[in-house]
Amino acid sequence: MNDRHGKKMIAPIVITALVVLYYAGLALGVIALGELPMIMMLFFGIGPLILAGAMIYVCIERIKEIRKGEEDDLSKY
């Protein structure tokens, strides 16, 4: 890994980790509460896990872009 690219990957990885931890905590909190009807537990429990998966996907795509040298996506437009 190129040192120049490595430093640019730190921020997306850290932000992704924080957001995924937040969503996982939210989902576990709702599921652990257990006082909600099942449909609400599924919606509020699985929803954040789906969002966490999407966040991980976006982070992986961003890392691929950084490795290709596309640090500034807005310059394309």
Image (cartoon, helix red, strand yellow):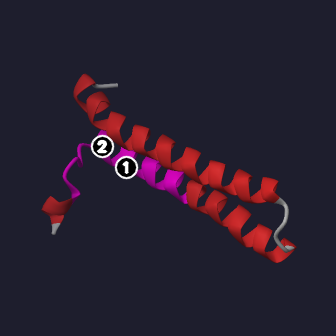
Which residues fall within the magenta stretch?
54-73
Quarter of the image with the N terminus in it: top left
Q: Nearer the viewer, residue 6 or 40?
A: 40
Secondary structure beneath disc 2?
Answer: helix
Q: Nearer the viewer, residue 45 or 5?
A: 45
Q: Position of residue 13 (x, y in %)?
A: 42, 39
Is residue 58 highlighted in magenta? Answer: yes
Circle on res. 66: 2
| Badge 2 vs badge 1, beta-carbon distance below 8 Å | yes
The residue lying at 24 percent from left, 49 percent from top is 70
Circle on res. 52: none
Q: Is residue 66 above or below residue 1?
A: below
Q: CA distance from mark 2 to mark 1?
A: 6 Å
Circle on res. 62: 1
The residue lying at 77 percent from left, 74 percent from top is 40
Q: Position of residue 36 (x, y in %)?
A: 82, 70
**Left or right, 67 with reference to 18:** left
Amino acid type, mark 2? Ile
